[in-house]
Amino acid sequence: MKKTLFLSIFCIYSALLYSQEKFTVNIGPDFRITPIELKPNWKSDITRPVTNTDAHLSGSALTYFLNYNPATINWRFSLGQSFRYDLLYYSDSYNFEENHSNDPIKTLIVDYHLKAEKYFELKSETELSVQLGFSLMDSSTHFAYTRLTGDTVIPAYGQDGSYDFRAYSLAFGISGNKLGLKIGGYFVEKHQFESMNEENPFILPYIQLQYVIIRLNNK
């Protein structure tokens, strides 16, 4: 459903894009910092494939954006995706109470972003900006639920789980003709990480570099 919705928005966006005056394509790395829990509290009654939440969420990702700039207002509207090959869970995760090493299971994780940015033009092609956004994060992080009964791990009715979650973002940026820098954070209200209380919101700070690889002006 999420992918279908994003694809529909993308197709509409692409059709409108070529009828407007300006668009750019940016690409660059995101550097995500250890999440900040707003209500720290342990709760875990289901044994899921245990991950290190800090390691799973933090790290780097490659991100691109398609940006539409209306000619009459200083706003920029963007659709983007982030890609990272990162930790999903540990292979021997059900023995997480014992002190021994486990093999990390990694996968390609994809995030989808929708952004709106107010920018202020300064001299020498420099801009300051404030950006708001909505993201569908941790796509492709599926796993099977299990329950722990004594020393036995059994399937939990064949149900599948996922670490995917929704996030709102706020960022402040500065950019020149080609290169831009943003510092911000994703605010996550609900999630499915077993190392946090599922009702525990958190903030995921990030630093983002973006380089303009395509700039077109349609007049």
Image: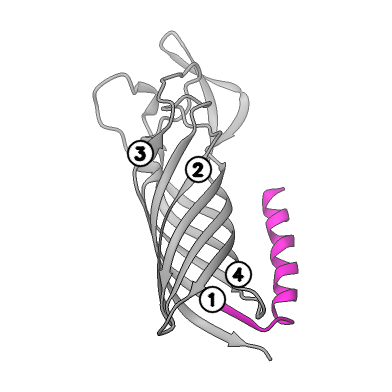
Choose the circle earlier in sequence order: 4 or 1.
Answer: 1
Mark in the foreground, 3 or 2: 2
Task: Quickly name the residue at label 2.
Answer: 187
Amino acid type, label 1: Val
Give residue 95's position: percent from left, percent from top: 35, 22
Task: Quickly name the residue at label 1.
Answer: 25
Q: Which residues are magenta?
A: 1-24
| Element type at mark 4 | strand
Task: Quickly name the residue at label 3.
Answer: 54
Q: Nearer the viewer, residue 17 or 138?
A: 17
Choose the circle earlier in sequence order: 3 or 1.
Answer: 1
* Mark 4 vs mark 1, CA separation in Å: 16 Å
Task: Quickly name the residue at label 4.
Answer: 75
Choose the circle earlier in sequence order: 1 or 2.
Answer: 1
Q: Nearer the viewer, residue 89 or 169?
A: 169
* Mark 3 vs mark 1, CA separation in Å: 31 Å
* Mark 1 vs mark 2, CA separation in Å: 25 Å
Verify CB contact (< 8 Å) between mark 3 and mark 1. no
Residue sitting at x 67%, y 53%: 3
Choose the circle earlier in sequence order: 3 or 4.
Answer: 3
117 in relation to 133, above or below = below
Choose the circle earlier in sequence order: 4 or 2.
Answer: 4
